[in-house]
Amino acid sequence: MRTFTDESGQTWEAFVAEREGLDYKGRYHFQVKRDGDDSETLGLPEIQWNSRETAERTLATMSEVELRRRLRSAVGRTSSS
């Protein structure tokens, strides 16, 4: 899990979520939520990994700029739905 702030100063948590099922390909994917708010999570299902170790390593090495960019993408998809 990574904590970061968006352009307005709101704190977010980026984390790895696991999809249930027998197929392990792309089982882990990128999710974000407001820090301390478990009621709503936003995801980007196309950002996926085959193992938890790879997913967590990638998340740990993402820059804050990249995390903000992915957050904007996830929020944009939600508001257009």
Image (cartoon, rainbow, N blue to C red):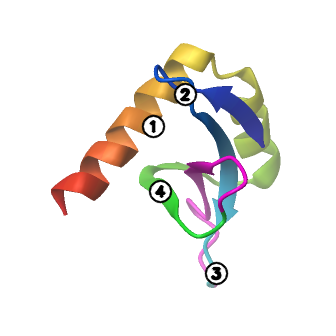
The answer to whether 7 appears left or right of 50 in the picture is: left
**Residue that protrudes farthest toward the left in the picture:** 80
Report crowding for label 1: few under 14, some 14 to 19, many 20 or more residues within 10 A (C-alpha). many
Q: Amino acid at mark 4?
A: Leu
**Residue that protrudes farthest toward the bottom in the picture:** 21
Q: Amino acid at mark 3?
A: Glu
- Between marks 3 and 4, how big is the CA–CA gap? 18 Å
At mark 4, the secondary structure is strand
Q: Looking at the picture, how far across and down is residue 80, in whole percent?
A: 17, 55
Q: Amino acid at mark 2?
A: Leu
Q: Which residue is mark 4?
A: 42
| Residue 41, image quadrant | bottom right
Magenta residues?
22-37
State yes or no: discs 3 and 4 in contact (Cβ < 8 Å): no
Q: Amino acid at mark 1?
A: Leu
Q: Which residue is mark 2?
A: 67
Report crowding for label 2: few under 14, some 14 to 19, many 20 or more residues within 10 A (C-alpha). many
The answer to whether 60 appears left or right of 44 in the picture is: right
At mark 2, the secondary structure is helix
Q: Which mark is residue 71?
A: 1
Q: Looking at the picture, how far across and down is residue 45, in whole percent?
A: 44, 57
Q: Earlier in the sequence, mark 1 or mark 4?
A: 4
Is residue 30 rendered magenta in the image? yes
Q: Earlier in the sequence, mark 1 or mark 3?
A: 3
> Which residue appears at 37% of the width and 34% of the height?
72
- Between marks 1 and 4, how big is the CA–CA gap? 8 Å
